[in-house]
Amino acid sequence: MPRPITIAFDVMGSDHGPSEVVKGAARLTLESPGIHALLVGDGDEIRKALEEIRHSGERVSVHHAPRFITMEEKPSAALQEKPDASVAVAARLVREGEADAVVSAGNTGAGVLACARHFQLIPGVRRAALAAVYPTQQEHGEKHDPFSLILDVGATVDATPDDLVAFAVMGAQYSKVISKNPDPKVALLSNGVEPQKGPPRVVEAHQKLAALKGIRFSGNVEGVDIPKGRADVIVTDGFVGNVCLKMLEGVAETVVDIARYAYKSKLRWRAGLAMLSSGIKRLKSITDWEQYGGAPVLGFDQLFIKAHGRSKSKAIANAGKVAAKAVSANLAAAIREGLPR
């Protein structure tokens, strides 16, 4: 029997506290027999939470970490002051071979920085990237699933042309492993579809990607193309990517708020929304971030999955499943093989 894949869960620091992360990890062990959950955080709180839920005792273990980093703390200063914080301990356990990947719903910056301090960058990768999954329109049956990947969304603010090329390779390999897409379409985000459009780093990255073998590069896309599903992987720097991600989240929340207002305001609007209920349910299902778990940090020799701070048990369990799938497929090796030599 192959040894189970061990996922280290940073139990502390999420919006809901330890209980939801523990529930999610416990749920994962019941749904996926080949996965072991290593719960990192306050040992007493973790054991108390485990006593109240059903779980697979032989596939759950606890590693005590006395402190944690809150959402409000500055990552660098907090990690300097708290080297024994749960997210740092979880990353160290992966580096030491006690676990295979990390899942955290805590402070994003602290998680990325903990990885940078304990993991190694894959040869050929200069900067790591935080990738985010977002819902898209499926066009003419070309899309394998209703989601696409955009990276970077915050880890590398100032990306060079070579960084953008590496992001493209990392995103394509992640799409192949997680979305089971054998030939993902990759595009660069710019202010025009023409190859010469965009700042110099984007123009140069376009030239390099067009010449790179082993990747299906479809050229530039504009912001309006992001939700239309014109690409499976969209590449940009962390500043622009983070702005795009926040805009997508804001639009989704606004649509829901408008629908609620309309439903409460007038009877005829309520009747119209009732007629559109099946479409609204479908929109809700594809924008439900709980089903895809979290955002991967790509570029390190080990995997970190950043779950949403508001994650409930379902999202935490799915983040663990995504991490296990990437480990099983040896994502780091796939990225290394795809990079230009």
Image (cartoon, helix red, strand yellow):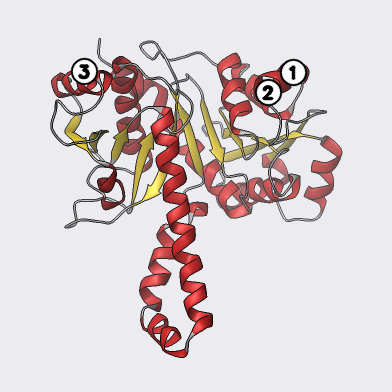
| Residue 284 image-quadrant placement | bottom left
Q: Nearer the viewer, residue 37 or 281?
A: 281
Is the C-beta separation of discs 3 and 2 under 8 Å?
no
Q: For this view, does 281 lie left or right of residue 109?
A: left
Q: CA distance from mark 2 to mark 1?
A: 6 Å
The single residue placed furthest to the bottom in the displayed view is: 267
Q: Nearer the viewer, residue 11 or 247?
A: 247
Q: Which residue is mark 3?
A: 204
| Residue 3 image-quadrant placement | top right
Image height of 16 relative to 85, above or below: below
Q: CA distance from mark 3 to mark 2?
A: 37 Å
Residue at 20%, 28% in the rendered image: 215
Q: For this view, does 263 lie left or right of residue 177?
A: right
Residue 83's tag is 1
Q: Position of residue 236 (x, y in %)?
A: 34, 30
* Other residues around mark 2 within 10 Å, as few (<14) / some (14–19) / many (≥20): many
* Other residues around mark 3 within 10 Å, as few (<14) / some (14–19) / many (≥20): some
Residue at 51%, 74% in the rendered image: 261
* Other residues around mark 1 within 10 Å, as few (<14) / some (14–19) / many (≥20): some
| Residue 184 image-quadrant placement | top left
Q: CA distance from mark 1 to mark 3?
A: 40 Å
Residue 341's tag is none
Residue at 43%, 17% in the rendered image: 127
Residue type for callout 1: Pro
Is the C-beta separation of discs 1 and 3 under 8 Å?
no
Q: Position of residue 252 (x, y in %)?
A: 44, 58
Q: Nearer the viewer, residue 203 or 331?
A: 203
Please give the count of numbered marks on the rendered protein: 3
Residue type for callout 3: Glu
Q: For this view, does 56 lie left or right of residue 109?
A: right
Is the C-beta separation of discs 2 and 1 under 8 Å?
yes
- Answer with mark 1 or mark 3, whichever residue precedes in sequence: 1
